[in-house]
Amino acid sequence: MSHISKPLFLKLLYIFFFFFCNSVSLSWSSSLSLHFPLTSLRLTPTTNSSSFKTSLLSRRNPSPSSSPYTFRSNFKYSMALILSLPIGTPSQSQELVLDTGSQLSWIQCHPKKIKKPLPPPTTSFDPSLSSSFSDLPCSHPLCKPRIPDFTLPTSCDSNRLCHYSYFYADGTFAEGNLVKEKFTFSNSQTTPPLILGCAKESTDVKGILGMNLGRLSFISQAKISKFSYCIPTRSNRPGLASTGSFYLGENPNSRGFKYVSLLTFPQSQRMPNLDPLAYTVPLLGIRIGQKRLNIPSSVFRPDAGGSGQTMVDSGSEFTHLVDVAYDKVKEEIVRLVGSRLKKGYVYGSTADMCFDGNHQMVIGRLIGDLVFEFGRGVEILVEKQRLLVNVGGGIHCVGIGRSSMLGAASNIIGNVHQQNLWVEFDVANRRVGFSKAECSRLSP
Protein backbone atom coordinates (compact mmCIF):
# COMPACT_ATOMS: atom_id res chain seq x y z
CA MET A 1 0.00 0.00 0.00
CA SER A 2 1.07 3.60 -0.47
CA HIS A 3 0.13 6.98 0.82
CA ILE A 4 -0.80 9.43 -1.85
CA SER A 5 0.82 12.16 0.21
CA LYS A 6 3.62 9.92 1.52
CA PRO A 7 4.75 7.25 -1.00
CA LEU A 8 4.21 3.71 0.18
CA PHE A 9 3.51 3.27 3.88
CA LEU A 10 3.16 -0.49 3.65
CA LYS A 11 4.43 -2.15 6.76
CA LEU A 12 5.03 1.17 8.31
CA LEU A 13 1.79 0.49 9.98
CA TYR A 14 0.15 -1.89 12.30
CA ILE A 15 -3.09 -3.27 10.89
CA PHE A 16 -5.99 -3.40 13.30
CA PHE A 17 -8.21 -5.65 11.24
CA PHE A 18 -10.07 -8.58 12.74
CA PHE A 19 -12.00 -10.86 10.45
CA PHE A 20 -13.71 -14.25 10.44
CA CYS A 21 -14.42 -16.37 7.42
CA ASN A 22 -17.20 -18.89 7.97
CA SER A 23 -17.46 -20.31 4.55
CA VAL A 24 -15.27 -19.97 1.50
CA SER A 25 -15.49 -22.75 -1.00
CA LEU A 26 -13.77 -22.39 -4.33
CA SER A 27 -12.44 -24.72 -6.97
CA TRP A 28 -10.05 -24.32 -9.85
CA SER A 29 -8.92 -26.87 -12.35
CA SER A 30 -7.33 -24.83 -15.11
CA SER A 31 -3.58 -24.68 -15.55
CA LEU A 32 -1.94 -21.35 -16.35
CA SER A 33 1.52 -20.30 -17.47
CA LEU A 34 1.91 -16.55 -17.16
CA HIS A 35 4.42 -13.71 -16.98
CA PHE A 36 3.88 -10.26 -15.48
CA PRO A 37 6.15 -7.37 -14.54
CA LEU A 38 6.67 -6.56 -10.87
CA THR A 39 7.67 -3.04 -9.91
CA SER A 40 8.33 -1.24 -6.66
CA LEU A 41 7.87 2.12 -5.00
CA ARG A 42 10.41 3.91 -2.87
CA LEU A 43 9.66 5.48 0.49
CA THR A 44 10.66 9.02 1.25
CA PRO A 45 12.79 9.66 4.36
CA THR A 46 9.69 11.06 6.09
CA THR A 47 7.87 7.76 5.86
CA ASN A 48 8.02 5.33 8.76
CA SER A 49 9.88 2.52 7.01
CA SER A 50 10.55 0.43 10.12
CA SER A 51 7.22 -1.16 9.78
CA PHE A 52 5.05 -3.90 11.04
CA LYS A 53 1.51 -4.96 10.48
CA THR A 54 -0.21 -7.97 11.91
CA SER A 55 -3.52 -9.30 10.70
CA LEU A 56 -5.90 -11.51 12.62
CA LEU A 57 -8.52 -12.34 10.07
CA SER A 58 -9.73 -15.93 9.80
CA ARG A 59 -8.50 -18.36 12.43
CA ARG A 60 -8.52 -21.19 9.95
CA ASN A 61 -5.66 -22.46 7.86
CA PRO A 62 -5.99 -23.43 4.20
CA SER A 63 -5.85 -26.95 2.89
CA PRO A 64 -3.83 -26.35 -0.28
CA SER A 65 -3.55 -28.76 -3.15
CA SER A 66 -1.03 -28.57 -5.98
CA SER A 67 -0.75 -25.13 -7.56
CA PRO A 68 -3.11 -24.71 -10.51
CA TYR A 69 -0.69 -22.45 -12.37
CA THR A 70 2.92 -21.32 -12.47
CA PHE A 71 4.56 -18.17 -13.73
CA ARG A 72 7.78 -16.24 -13.38
CA SER A 73 8.04 -12.48 -13.29
CA ASN A 74 10.75 -9.91 -12.72
CA PHE A 75 10.33 -7.10 -10.23
CA LYS A 76 12.13 -3.95 -9.32
CA TYR A 77 12.94 -3.60 -5.64
CA SER A 78 13.58 -0.59 -3.48
CA MET A 79 11.13 -0.88 -0.59
CA ALA A 80 8.24 -3.20 -1.48
CA LEU A 81 7.25 -5.50 -4.34
CA ILE A 82 4.51 -4.16 -6.58
CA LEU A 83 2.78 -6.70 -8.80
CA SER A 84 0.64 -5.67 -11.78
CA LEU A 85 -2.20 -8.14 -12.27
CA PRO A 86 -5.04 -8.24 -14.82
CA ILE A 87 -8.36 -8.23 -12.98
CA GLY A 88 -11.92 -8.35 -14.33
CA THR A 89 -13.56 -9.14 -17.68
CA PRO A 90 -12.15 -7.62 -19.81
CA SER A 91 -9.09 -7.23 -17.63
CA GLN A 92 -7.90 -4.02 -16.05
CA SER A 93 -4.30 -3.88 -14.80
CA GLN A 94 -4.08 -3.30 -11.04
CA GLU A 95 -0.96 -2.65 -8.97
CA LEU A 96 -0.90 -4.68 -5.76
CA VAL A 97 1.71 -4.95 -3.03
CA LEU A 98 2.88 -8.55 -2.67
CA ASP A 99 2.37 -9.11 1.05
CA THR A 100 3.02 -12.36 2.92
CA GLY A 101 1.87 -10.71 6.13
CA SER A 102 -1.78 -10.00 5.34
CA GLN A 103 -4.84 -11.89 4.20
CA LEU A 104 -7.54 -9.91 2.42
CA SER A 105 -6.55 -8.66 -1.02
CA TRP A 106 -8.02 -5.35 -2.05
CA ILE A 107 -8.00 -3.16 -5.10
CA GLN A 108 -8.58 0.55 -5.67
CA CYS A 109 -12.12 1.41 -6.75
CA HIS A 110 -12.18 5.17 -6.17
CA PRO A 111 -15.03 7.01 -7.91
CA LYS A 112 -13.30 9.06 -10.55
CA LYS A 113 -15.67 12.05 -10.47
CA ILE A 114 -15.64 12.70 -6.74
CA LYS A 115 -13.12 15.26 -5.54
CA LYS A 116 -11.08 14.20 -2.55
CA PRO A 117 -8.33 15.81 -0.49
CA LEU A 118 -5.99 13.41 -2.27
CA PRO A 119 -6.44 12.44 -5.93
CA PRO A 120 -7.55 8.90 -6.76
CA PRO A 121 -4.90 6.58 -8.17
CA THR A 122 -4.54 6.46 -11.94
CA THR A 123 -4.91 2.67 -11.87
CA SER A 124 -8.29 2.70 -10.13
CA PHE A 125 -10.49 -0.26 -11.04
CA ASP A 126 -13.80 0.54 -12.71
CA PRO A 127 -16.38 -2.14 -11.74
CA SER A 128 -18.84 -0.96 -14.38
CA LEU A 129 -16.47 -2.11 -17.12
CA SER A 130 -16.24 -5.71 -15.87
CA SER A 131 -18.91 -8.31 -16.61
CA SER A 132 -17.55 -10.66 -13.89
CA PHE A 133 -17.74 -8.14 -11.02
CA SER A 134 -20.28 -8.59 -8.20
CA ASP A 135 -20.79 -7.08 -4.75
CA LEU A 136 -21.18 -9.17 -1.61
CA PRO A 137 -24.61 -8.57 -0.06
CA CYS A 138 -25.15 -8.11 3.66
CA SER A 139 -26.60 -11.61 3.78
CA HIS A 140 -23.22 -13.15 2.98
CA PRO A 141 -21.62 -15.06 5.91
CA LEU A 142 -18.67 -12.64 5.97
CA CYS A 143 -21.07 -9.92 7.06
CA LYS A 144 -22.52 -12.12 9.78
CA PRO A 145 -19.55 -12.73 12.10
CA ARG A 146 -20.09 -15.22 14.91
CA ILE A 147 -17.08 -14.46 17.09
CA PRO A 148 -18.27 -12.09 19.83
CA ASP A 149 -14.82 -11.37 21.31
CA PHE A 150 -13.42 -9.59 18.25
CA THR A 151 -14.13 -6.14 16.89
CA LEU A 152 -15.06 -6.86 13.31
CA PRO A 153 -14.74 -4.27 10.55
CA THR A 154 -17.67 -5.41 8.43
CA SER A 155 -21.04 -3.72 8.41
CA CYS A 156 -24.09 -3.36 6.23
CA ASP A 157 -24.18 -0.15 4.21
CA SER A 158 -27.20 1.80 3.00
CA ASN A 159 -27.33 -0.27 -0.18
CA ARG A 160 -27.42 -3.54 1.79
CA LEU A 161 -23.87 -4.34 0.66
CA CYS A 162 -21.05 -5.69 2.82
CA HIS A 163 -18.79 -2.83 3.91
CA TYR A 164 -15.26 -3.27 5.31
CA SER A 165 -12.63 -0.97 6.84
CA TYR A 166 -8.88 -1.12 7.36
CA PHE A 167 -7.41 1.18 9.99
CA TYR A 168 -3.72 1.85 10.41
CA ALA A 169 -1.61 3.07 13.30
CA ASP A 170 -0.49 6.22 11.47
CA GLY A 171 -4.08 7.33 10.92
CA THR A 172 -4.39 6.17 7.32
CA PHE A 173 -7.21 3.95 6.17
CA ALA A 174 -8.84 2.01 3.35
CA GLU A 175 -12.50 1.16 3.21
CA GLY A 176 -15.09 0.05 0.73
CA ASN A 177 -17.18 -3.00 -0.13
CA LEU A 178 -16.33 -6.67 -0.25
CA VAL A 179 -16.76 -7.96 -3.78
CA LYS A 180 -16.11 -10.95 -5.99
CA GLU A 181 -13.96 -10.62 -9.08
CA LYS A 182 -11.86 -12.77 -11.37
CA PHE A 183 -8.19 -12.48 -12.16
CA THR A 184 -8.40 -12.67 -15.95
CA PHE A 185 -5.12 -13.74 -17.51
CA SER A 186 -6.50 -14.59 -20.94
CA ASN A 187 -9.80 -15.46 -22.58
CA SER A 188 -9.38 -19.09 -21.54
CA GLN A 189 -7.40 -18.71 -18.31
CA THR A 190 -9.09 -17.05 -15.36
CA THR A 191 -9.49 -17.63 -11.66
CA PRO A 192 -12.92 -18.22 -10.22
CA PRO A 193 -14.47 -15.15 -8.59
CA LEU A 194 -12.32 -14.33 -5.55
CA ILE A 195 -13.41 -12.30 -2.56
CA LEU A 196 -11.62 -8.94 -2.56
CA GLY A 197 -11.92 -5.55 -0.98
CA CYS A 198 -12.93 -2.77 -3.37
CA ALA A 199 -11.60 0.39 -1.71
CA LYS A 200 -13.68 3.50 -2.38
CA GLU A 201 -11.98 5.64 0.23
CA SER A 202 -8.25 5.36 0.76
CA THR A 203 -5.12 7.37 1.40
CA ASP A 204 -3.13 4.85 -0.64
CA VAL A 205 -2.39 4.51 -4.33
CA LYS A 206 -1.74 0.76 -4.37
CA GLY A 207 -3.81 -2.22 -3.35
CA ILE A 208 -2.72 -5.38 -1.56
CA LEU A 209 -2.24 -8.97 -2.69
CA GLY A 210 -2.67 -10.87 0.57
CA MET A 211 -0.49 -14.01 0.64
CA ASN A 212 -0.66 -15.31 4.22
CA LEU A 213 -2.25 -18.54 5.46
CA GLY A 214 -5.77 -17.19 5.92
CA ARG A 215 -8.70 -18.63 4.03
CA LEU A 216 -9.38 -15.32 2.30
CA SER A 217 -5.80 -14.85 1.06
CA PHE A 218 -5.03 -15.00 -2.63
CA ILE A 219 -3.06 -18.24 -2.29
CA SER A 220 -5.87 -19.94 -0.37
CA GLN A 221 -8.72 -18.86 -2.62
CA ALA A 222 -6.70 -19.59 -5.78
CA LYS A 223 -5.34 -22.82 -4.26
CA ILE A 224 -1.67 -21.93 -4.69
CA SER A 225 0.60 -24.39 -2.91
CA LYS A 226 3.97 -22.68 -3.38
CA PHE A 227 5.55 -19.34 -4.28
CA SER A 228 9.02 -17.82 -4.01
CA TYR A 229 10.98 -14.65 -4.59
CA CYS A 230 14.58 -13.47 -4.77
CA ILE A 231 15.12 -9.89 -3.56
CA PRO A 232 18.28 -8.20 -4.84
CA THR A 233 20.39 -5.74 -2.91
CA ARG A 234 19.24 -2.18 -3.33
CA SER A 235 20.76 0.25 -5.74
CA ASN A 236 22.60 3.08 -4.00
CA ARG A 237 21.89 5.44 -6.87
CA PRO A 238 18.82 7.69 -6.39
CA GLY A 239 15.95 6.89 -8.71
CA LEU A 240 17.27 3.48 -9.70
CA ALA A 241 15.81 0.21 -8.48
CA SER A 242 17.27 -3.28 -8.56
CA THR A 243 15.59 -6.20 -10.32
CA GLY A 244 14.72 -9.56 -8.79
CA SER A 245 12.65 -12.65 -9.58
CA PHE A 246 9.32 -14.08 -8.45
CA TYR A 247 7.79 -17.51 -9.05
CA LEU A 248 4.26 -18.62 -8.44
CA GLY A 249 4.24 -22.42 -8.31
CA GLU A 250 7.36 -24.52 -8.84
CA ASN A 251 10.77 -22.84 -8.80
CA PRO A 252 13.46 -24.55 -10.94
CA ASN A 253 16.11 -23.38 -8.45
CA SER A 254 14.54 -25.18 -5.48
CA ARG A 255 17.02 -28.09 -5.44
CA GLY A 256 19.44 -25.95 -3.48
CA PHE A 257 16.91 -24.75 -0.93
CA LYS A 258 17.23 -25.57 2.77
CA TYR A 259 13.93 -25.73 4.60
CA VAL A 260 12.65 -25.00 8.07
CA SER A 261 9.23 -26.23 9.13
CA LEU A 262 6.59 -23.67 9.95
CA LEU A 263 5.24 -23.52 13.47
CA THR A 264 1.52 -24.07 13.17
CA PHE A 265 -1.27 -23.33 15.60
CA PRO A 266 -4.69 -24.98 15.79
CA GLN A 267 -7.78 -22.82 15.54
CA SER A 268 -8.63 -23.61 19.15
CA GLN A 269 -5.25 -22.27 20.35
CA ARG A 270 -6.18 -18.62 20.61
CA MET A 271 -3.52 -16.38 22.08
CA PRO A 272 -3.96 -12.60 22.27
CA ASN A 273 -0.50 -11.73 20.86
CA LEU A 274 -0.35 -14.43 18.18
CA ASP A 275 -1.04 -14.14 14.47
CA PRO A 276 -1.84 -17.78 13.56
CA LEU A 277 -1.97 -16.94 9.85
CA ALA A 278 1.62 -15.70 9.56
CA TYR A 279 4.57 -17.71 8.28
CA THR A 280 6.01 -18.47 11.72
CA VAL A 281 9.54 -19.90 11.73
CA PRO A 282 11.75 -21.35 14.50
CA LEU A 283 14.45 -18.70 14.94
CA LEU A 284 17.03 -20.04 17.40
CA GLY A 285 19.58 -17.27 17.83
CA ILE A 286 21.52 -14.29 16.45
CA ARG A 287 25.24 -13.88 15.82
CA ILE A 288 27.17 -10.66 15.33
CA GLY A 289 30.64 -11.20 13.95
CA GLN A 290 31.90 -14.39 15.59
CA LYS A 291 29.83 -13.89 18.74
CA ARG A 292 26.59 -15.69 19.41
CA LEU A 293 24.49 -13.33 21.49
CA ASN A 294 23.22 -14.50 24.86
CA ILE A 295 19.55 -14.48 23.87
CA PRO A 296 17.31 -17.26 25.18
CA SER A 297 15.82 -19.12 22.22
CA SER A 298 12.46 -18.94 24.00
CA VAL A 299 12.11 -15.25 23.07
CA PHE A 300 11.85 -16.24 19.39
CA ARG A 301 8.90 -18.59 19.91
CA PRO A 302 5.37 -17.86 21.11
CA ASP A 303 4.87 -18.03 24.86
CA ALA A 304 1.56 -18.86 26.56
CA GLY A 305 0.12 -15.55 25.37
CA GLY A 306 1.58 -15.73 21.85
CA SER A 307 4.38 -13.20 22.43
CA GLY A 308 7.71 -13.99 20.78
CA GLN A 309 6.41 -15.34 17.48
CA THR A 310 8.93 -14.98 14.61
CA MET A 311 7.44 -14.42 11.17
CA VAL A 312 8.74 -13.89 7.63
CA ASP A 313 7.09 -10.88 6.01
CA SER A 314 7.74 -9.70 2.46
CA GLY A 315 6.00 -6.38 3.03
CA SER A 316 7.82 -5.26 6.17
CA GLU A 317 11.01 -3.42 5.34
CA PHE A 318 12.92 -3.56 8.63
CA THR A 319 13.34 -6.58 10.85
CA HIS A 320 11.83 -6.10 14.30
CA LEU A 321 12.75 -7.85 17.54
CA VAL A 322 11.11 -8.13 20.94
CA ASP A 323 12.78 -6.15 23.71
CA VAL A 324 14.95 -8.95 25.14
CA ALA A 325 16.50 -9.70 21.75
CA TYR A 326 16.73 -6.07 20.65
CA ASP A 327 18.52 -5.05 23.84
CA LYS A 328 21.14 -7.76 23.36
CA VAL A 329 21.74 -6.74 19.74
CA LYS A 330 22.07 -3.08 20.69
CA GLU A 331 24.36 -3.94 23.60
CA GLU A 332 26.78 -5.63 21.22
CA ILE A 333 26.54 -2.84 18.64
CA VAL A 334 27.28 -0.27 21.36
CA ARG A 335 30.26 -2.34 22.53
CA LEU A 336 31.69 -2.41 19.03
CA VAL A 337 30.90 1.07 17.69
CA GLY A 338 29.02 2.89 20.43
CA SER A 339 31.01 6.10 20.07
CA ARG A 340 29.81 6.43 16.48
CA LEU A 341 26.08 6.08 17.18
CA LYS A 342 23.91 9.09 16.38
CA LYS A 343 22.74 10.09 19.83
CA GLY A 344 19.08 10.87 20.36
CA TYR A 345 18.08 9.73 16.89
CA VAL A 346 15.28 7.20 16.38
CA TYR A 347 14.23 6.24 12.87
CA GLY A 348 10.60 5.36 12.32
CA SER A 349 9.96 5.43 16.07
CA THR A 350 11.59 2.01 16.46
CA ALA A 351 15.21 1.96 15.24
CA ASP A 352 17.88 3.79 17.24
CA MET A 353 21.06 2.08 16.02
CA CYS A 354 21.89 4.75 13.44
CA PHE A 355 24.95 6.60 12.20
CA ASP A 356 25.78 9.90 10.50
CA GLY A 357 27.78 10.23 7.33
CA ASN A 358 28.89 7.85 4.62
CA HIS A 359 31.08 5.58 6.69
CA GLN A 360 28.81 2.54 6.55
CA MET A 361 31.55 0.32 5.16
CA VAL A 362 33.89 1.20 8.04
CA ILE A 363 31.14 0.63 10.58
CA GLY A 364 30.19 -2.63 8.87
CA ARG A 365 33.73 -3.91 9.16
CA LEU A 366 33.85 -2.99 12.86
CA ILE A 367 30.59 -4.80 13.56
CA GLY A 368 30.95 -7.79 11.23
CA ASP A 369 28.32 -10.06 9.67
CA LEU A 370 24.87 -10.46 11.18
CA VAL A 371 23.43 -13.98 11.18
CA PHE A 372 19.93 -15.22 12.03
CA GLU A 373 20.13 -18.90 13.04
CA PHE A 374 17.31 -21.33 12.33
CA GLY A 375 17.06 -25.07 12.83
CA ARG A 376 18.68 -27.70 10.61
CA GLY A 377 21.66 -25.49 9.85
CA VAL A 378 19.59 -22.90 8.03
CA GLU A 379 20.89 -19.34 8.41
CA ILE A 380 20.19 -15.89 7.02
CA LEU A 381 23.51 -14.14 6.53
CA VAL A 382 23.54 -10.35 6.39
CA GLU A 383 27.04 -9.52 5.19
CA LYS A 384 28.82 -6.63 6.86
CA GLN A 385 28.93 -4.54 3.69
CA ARG A 386 25.14 -4.38 3.65
CA LEU A 387 24.52 -4.28 7.37
CA LEU A 388 23.44 -0.63 7.34
CA VAL A 389 20.40 0.74 5.52
CA ASN A 390 20.37 4.19 3.95
CA VAL A 391 17.35 5.98 5.43
CA GLY A 392 18.05 9.33 3.81
CA GLY A 393 19.58 12.56 4.98
CA GLY A 394 23.03 11.02 5.13
CA ILE A 395 21.93 8.66 7.90
CA HIS A 396 22.40 4.88 7.89
CA CYS A 397 20.75 2.51 10.37
CA VAL A 398 21.11 -1.12 11.32
CA GLY A 399 17.93 -2.49 9.71
CA ILE A 400 16.43 -3.62 13.00
CA GLY A 401 13.72 -1.96 15.08
CA ARG A 402 12.13 -2.57 18.46
CA SER A 403 8.75 -4.25 17.93
CA SER A 404 7.33 -3.08 21.26
CA MET A 405 7.44 0.49 19.94
CA LEU A 406 4.89 -0.63 17.38
CA GLY A 407 2.65 -2.17 20.00
CA ALA A 408 3.65 -5.60 18.75
CA ALA A 409 4.97 -8.60 20.68
CA SER A 410 6.49 -10.42 17.71
CA ASN A 411 9.76 -10.79 15.83
CA ILE A 412 9.52 -9.97 12.13
CA ILE A 413 12.09 -10.84 9.47
CA GLY A 414 11.72 -7.90 7.07
CA ASN A 415 12.60 -7.80 3.41
CA VAL A 416 15.81 -5.84 4.05
CA HIS A 417 17.19 -9.06 5.58
CA GLN A 418 15.84 -11.26 2.81
CA GLN A 419 18.08 -9.72 0.16
CA ASN A 420 20.21 -12.04 -1.99
CA LEU A 421 18.17 -15.04 -0.92
CA TRP A 422 15.65 -17.28 -2.54
CA VAL A 423 12.77 -17.42 -0.08
CA GLU A 424 10.17 -20.07 -0.84
CA PHE A 425 6.83 -20.43 0.92
CA ASP A 426 5.91 -24.10 0.53
CA VAL A 427 2.38 -23.91 1.85
CA ALA A 428 1.44 -27.49 1.01
CA ASN A 429 4.33 -28.88 3.08
CA ARG A 430 4.20 -26.23 5.81
CA ARG A 431 7.77 -25.01 5.41
CA VAL A 432 9.89 -22.07 4.26
CA GLY A 433 13.01 -22.58 2.15
CA PHE A 434 16.10 -20.38 1.88
CA SER A 435 19.02 -20.39 -0.53
CA LYS A 436 21.77 -17.84 -1.08
CA ALA A 437 21.68 -16.25 -4.53
CA GLU A 438 22.84 -13.23 -6.51
CA CYS A 439 19.30 -12.10 -7.13
CA SER A 440 20.11 -9.18 -9.40
CA ARG A 441 21.83 -11.57 -11.82
CA LEU A 442 18.85 -13.89 -12.18
CA SER A 443 16.75 -11.53 -14.25
CA PRO A 444 17.25 -11.03 -17.97
Image (tube, rainbow, N blue to C red):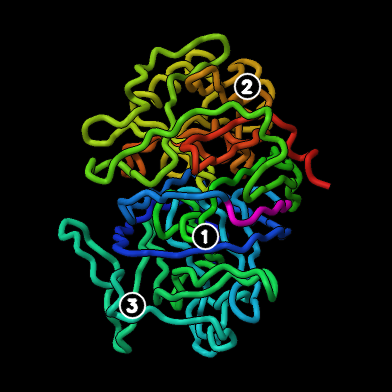
How far separated are the C-alphas under marks 3 and 2?
53 Å
Asked if labels 2 and 3 touch by Cβ distance under 8 angstroms, the answer is: no
- Does 68 appear in magenta? yes
Q: Secondary structure at mark 2?
A: helix
> Percent x, y for residue 423?
60, 37
- Placement of 409 over or under 92, stated as above or below: above
Q: Is residue 186 visible?
A: yes
> Percent x, y for residue 125?
57, 78
Highlighted magenta segment, given as a residue range: 67-74
Q: Residue furthest left?
A: 148
Q: Nearer the viewer, residue 231 or 287?
A: 231
**In-image side of 299 versus 261 (left or right):** left
Give residue 222's mark.
1
Give residue 162's mark.
3
Q: Residue at 30% x, 86% y: name it.
A: 160
**Badge 1, how many Cα within 10 Å: few under 14, some, many 20+?**
many
**Badge 3, how many Cα within 10 Å: few under 14, some, many 20+?**
many
Identify the mark nearer the N-term, 2 or 1: 1
Q: Residue furthest top?
A: 290
Give residue 363's mark.
2
